[in-house]
Image (cartoon, helix red, strand yellow):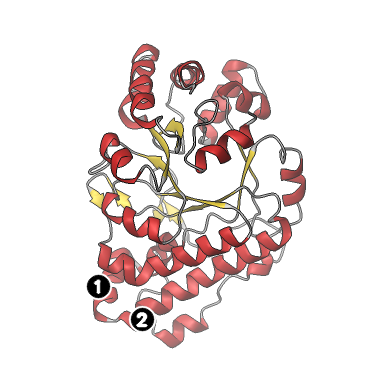
């Protein structure tokens, strides 16, 4: 099988020739590893055995510069936190009058060129990341949002709709342009923490479920699988995620509350593809190559049966401090022992 066939067979919960591999990376880790292994971008993807290629479209301002569509300024450690919440005290009318980003300013011109060379060999990830949950939090503040979801549901529904509608319109444009190239509609919203879900099943059902379902329906209308990136522990939300039509969940973190791999595979493995599962918090960063190999073997033993498993680190962004030799140990072990 080639990568595309391998991945789509796995999404179908059938056993492919071997377990597909996924490599997501921070720019810092990527550049360090290219230098250490004397490889270019594509050479490094091939060395790690990544079965995926991704196509993306930037949001451009009126001067043609790539910018964040909602204009939230950030600061602090890593990629930072929102420095302000511009609509925290806004009325419904003020929210509607806010200068929302224009879906037509997303530049689709390079998408087909990005994907055409990989179409028949690799599984292509596409669509907009669409972090509507995160952007709503940035626009109004998390505590404020949770209070108002209970006390002012009309206000809360309005901000959710305004943010979501932008992303939905962007994805409609992307699929109309290159839907024939996209194998997997890849979206991201972190619903969990180390200690479990950030939102209860009742609020998820009222505010988020309809939007995930609408995104899933859009992807399925173009024949794409739908993969949700979701960090942290969110086991209690998985039945609703499945009901919404999400086909797979990405970057499963076994160190988080409720994310024990045996239980996830037993309870949801026939309905939901699991991607990740090899602990990057305590193993891939801090371990030795031999320890990484042993933990990878344990993960393969649990997650391989019956397909429905893509192997990789338990967080999509391999951080700059991650040893390249540990990542090589992980992927080489998957290659050697992940055969059906």
The secondary element bearing badge 2 is classed as helix
Question: Is 198 left, or right, of 138 in this rendering?
Answer: left
Classify residue 276 as left or right of residue 102. left
Quarter of the image for the N terminus: give it. Answer: top right
Q: Nearer the viewer, residue 127 or 6?
A: 6
Residue at left offset 37%, top offset 46% = 231
Q: Position of residue 313 (x, y in %)?
A: 42, 32
Label 1 packing within 10 angstroms: few (<14), some (14-19), many (20+) = few
Question: Are the residues flagged by discs 2 and 1 in contact, CB closer than 8 Å?
Answer: no
Residue position for label 1: 147
- Looking at the image, the residue that sits furthest to the bottom is 93
Q: Is residue 54 above or below residue 138?
A: above
Question: Can residue 199 be seen here?
Answer: yes
The image shows a total of numbered marks equal to 2
Query: Does 68 appear above or below 154?
Result: above
Q: Quadrant of residue 218?
A: bottom right
Image coordinates for residue 31, horizontal then vertical, percent: 58, 28
Q: Residue at x 65, y 55 (%)?
A: 58
Position of residue 269 relative to residue 20, above or below, is below
Q: Which residue is mark 2?
A: 155
Q: Position of residue 79 (x, y in %)?
A: 45, 46
**Residue 210's image quarter?**
bottom left
Specify the label residue 340 is tagged with: none
Instruction: Name the residue: 60% across, 57% down.
Output: 67
Q: Residue at x 40, y 14 (%)?
A: 289
- Closer to the N terminus: mark 2 or mark 1? 1
Q: Residue 283 location, x and y as percent?
A: 33, 24
- The Cα–Cα distance between marks 2 and 1, rounded to whole angstroms, is 11 Å
Element type where label 1 sits in the image = helix
């Amino acid at each position: 099988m080639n990568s595309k066939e391998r991945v789509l067979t796995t999404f179908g919960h059938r056993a492919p020739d071997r377990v597909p591999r996924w490599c997501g990376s921070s720019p810092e880790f990527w550049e360090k590893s290219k230098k250490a292994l004397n490889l270019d971008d594509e050479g490094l993807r091939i060395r790690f055995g990544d079965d995926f290629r991704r196509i993306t479209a930037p949001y451009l301002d009126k001067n043609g510069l790539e910018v964040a569509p909602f204009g939230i300024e950030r600061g602090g450690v890593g990629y930072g936190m929102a420095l302000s919440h511009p609509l925290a005290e806004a009325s419904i009318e003020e929210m509607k009058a806010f200068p929302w980003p224009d879906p037509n300013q997303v530049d689709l011109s390079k998408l087909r060129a990005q994907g055409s060379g990989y179409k028949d060999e690799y599984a292509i990830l596409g669509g907009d990341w669409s972090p509507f949950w995160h952007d709503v939090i940035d626009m109004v503040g998390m505590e404020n949002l949770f209070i108002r979801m209970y006390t002012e549901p009309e206000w809360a529904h309005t901000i959710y709709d305004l943010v979501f509608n932008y992303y939905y319109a962007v994805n409609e444009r992307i699929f109309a342009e290159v839907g024939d190239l996209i194998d997997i509609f890849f979206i991201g919203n972190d619903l969990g923490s180390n200690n479990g879900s950030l939102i209860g099943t009742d609020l998820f059902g009222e505010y988020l479920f309809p939007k995930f379902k609408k995104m899933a329906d859009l992807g399925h209308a173009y024949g794409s699988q739908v993969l949700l990136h979701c960090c942290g522990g969110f086991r209690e939300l998985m039945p609703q995620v499945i009901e919404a039509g999400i086909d797979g969940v990405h970057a499963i973190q076994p160190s988080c509350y409720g994310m024990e791999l045996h239980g996830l595979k037993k309870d949801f493995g026939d309905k939901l593809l699991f991607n990740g599962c090899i602990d990057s918090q305590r193993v891939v960063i801090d371990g030795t190559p031999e320890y990484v190999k042993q933990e990878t073997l344990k993960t393969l033993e649990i997650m391989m049966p019956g397909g429905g498993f893509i192997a990789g680190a338990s967080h999509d962004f391999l951080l700059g401090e991650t040893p390249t030799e540990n990542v090589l140990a992980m992927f080489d072990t998957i290659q050697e022992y992940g055969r059906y």
